[in-house]
Image: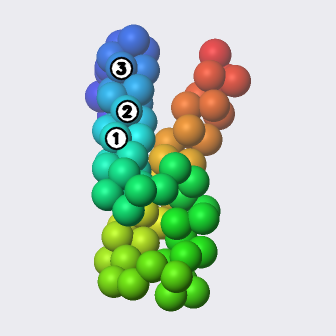
Amino acid sequence: MIRVKRETLEELIDYKLRFLNREIDKILTKWDYTNPELFLQHARDGTIEEAEPDAITLRQLLKERDETYQMKQDWNSNK
């Protein structure tokens, strides 16, 4: 275990969230979508072809973002 200032950890978490949001936006912009769920649905049902690799990446990025938001929320509620 190492000691780290709380402010430093908050900055790292915020940086990670910004990075994840940028990567999510890049994928959605590439396919001209604003709603990630709609993009995933259209990739799944074949409405948009050849989107499977980006859909897999997007799904992972969304999961990681949700987990990071949850961690931040849990952490802030335990101040």
Question: For the residues marked 1 and 2, what is the alpha-carbon distance in whole angstroms?
Answer: 6 Å
- Sort mark 3 into few (<14), some (14-19) or many (20+) by Cα contacts within 10 Å: few
User: Quick one: 20 or 6, which is closer to the camera?
Assistant: 20
Residue matched to label 2: 18
Q: Could you tell me if the residues under marks 1 and 3 are in contact, i.e. CB atoms within 8 Å?
A: no
Residue matched to label 3: 11
Dot label at residue 22: 1
Of all residues shown, which one is farthest toward the bottom?
46
Residue 34 is left or right of residue 10, and the answer is: right
User: Quick one: 30 or 53, which is closer to the camera?
Assistant: 30
Q: Which amino acid does label 2 sit on?
A: Arg
| Callout in the foreground (1, 2) | 1
Q: Where is residue 21 in the image (x, y as percent from the top left)?
A: 41, 41
Residue 56 visible in the shown view: no
Q: Where is residue 55 in the image (x, y as percent from the top left)?
A: 42, 72
| Callout in the foreground (2, 3) | 2
SS assignment at label 1: helix
Mark toward the start of the polypeptide (2 vs 3): 3
Please tell me in which quadrant of the rendered image residue 20 appears. top left
Residue 46 is left or right of residue 11, and the answer is: right
